[in-house]
Image (spheres, rainbow, N blue to C red):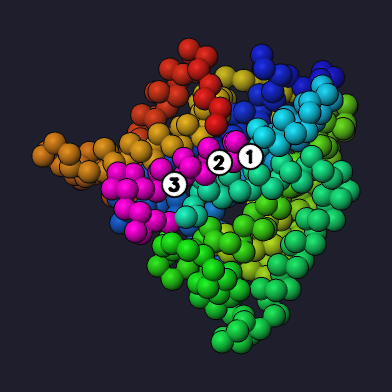
Amino acid sequence: MSELSTNASDRLISLDALRGFTIAGMVIVNDPGSWSHVFSPLLHAEWNGSTPTDLVFPFFLFMVGVSIALAYTKRIKAGADKKDLYKKILSRTVKIYLLGMFLTLFPKFDFANIRLVGVLPRISIVFFFAAIIFLNTNWKQQIRLAIGILVGYFILMVYIPIPGIGAPDLSGPETNWANWIDKNFLPGRMYRGTWDPEGILSTFPAIVTSMVGMLIGTLILSLKDVYKKLTWLFFAGFIMLLIGEAWHWFFPINKHIWTSSYVMYAGGLATLSLAACILVVDILGYHKWTFIGKVYGANAITSYVLAGLLTQVFYRDLFGFGAPNKLFMDGMTGIVSAEMASFMYAILYMLIIFLPALYMYRKKIFIRV
């Protein structure tokens, strides 16, 4: 087979599926039956280190970057006006950010305690800068910029003294530059009270996560032979993973402050995962198992927002019978462990969110924000 299989919209089926499985993973880790009973791999690392849950967000940002490379390369070749592209980029950025604000405020709309950063706001900001960078640089310039950001972030976070604190201490969340900048310049409420995992400074290496995806997308487009393409993807993923693990000795892998080692570690695993999906799905043609991923991937942001909104129904006692999650946990008492019951509820909730996504998929309703 000499070409990768694509769906009707000329998109990599593997990329759509991996994006959708990532969204499904986001729903599962965000919505357990009880936060008091969760299997440890489904929790974020307390501080330094990484769990499978810590890979969900960077995987999504990585795929944002791959999509930018695939989509905008095609549009540029078709003669699209850059001014029109900039307008669409800005429009999409604002829409995703406002969706994030709506999700944060719903249902109380307490503007006095608003949090101005978060998952969707970070996605919107990362998308904006990554797309602008892609339209104005080539792949060599992108590599230099990515290296500059990651090395500069490493030097700042590890070696530069912090005003009023002194030498940075990465053993905790409140003695680093990211926290100092957020405390002094980030308006609104912080997620952890005194620090925020989606703050200002850590957004810069998060942009690099998408830039890694952009470079991988460019690699996919530049190589015609599928086996050479796969060889380079697996090689690039393995090298990034090694760099991330080695850098971890000097700059710990940490999602909360999105360390440079974390960018390389997660980027390497994301590249290896995409390469494996391309091999299994697009080359070998095993498509059936990707159905849930394709459905979620077709309306990724919409599904994520819907899951966030419906938590207000499934985690609250709205009708006087008890919150659905508590009823489920009580009903499973004595049948399975509390952790397994909590996990089963998360899977059930993911499948509930899957139903409207499936309806939209079958009706060919694709909401593009």
The secondary structure type at the circle numbered 3 is helix
Which residue is rendered at x = 68% and y = 76% of the image? Answer: 158
Q: Which is nearer the N-term, disc 3 or disc 1?
A: 1
- Give percent across and percent down for residue 237: 75, 47
Question: Magenta span has 112?
Answer: yes
Question: What residue type is disc 2 on?
Answer: Val
The residue singled out by tag 2 in the image is 94
The residue singled out by tag 3 in the image is 101
Question: What residue type is disc 1 on?
Answer: Leu
Dot 2 alpha-carbon crowd within 10 angstroms: few under 14, some 14 to 19, many 20 or more: some
Q: Which is nearer the N-term, disc 3 or disc 2?
A: 2
Quadrant position of the C terminus in the picture: top right
Which residue is rendered at x = 66% and y = 24% of the image? Answer: 13
Q: Is residue 210 left or right of residue 30?
A: right
Boundaries of the magenta span: 91-115
- Give percent across and percent down for residue 212: 74, 47
The residue singled out by tag 1 in the image is 90
**Residue 259 in view, yes or no:** yes
Query: Mark 3 to mark 2: distance in Å?
Result: 10 Å
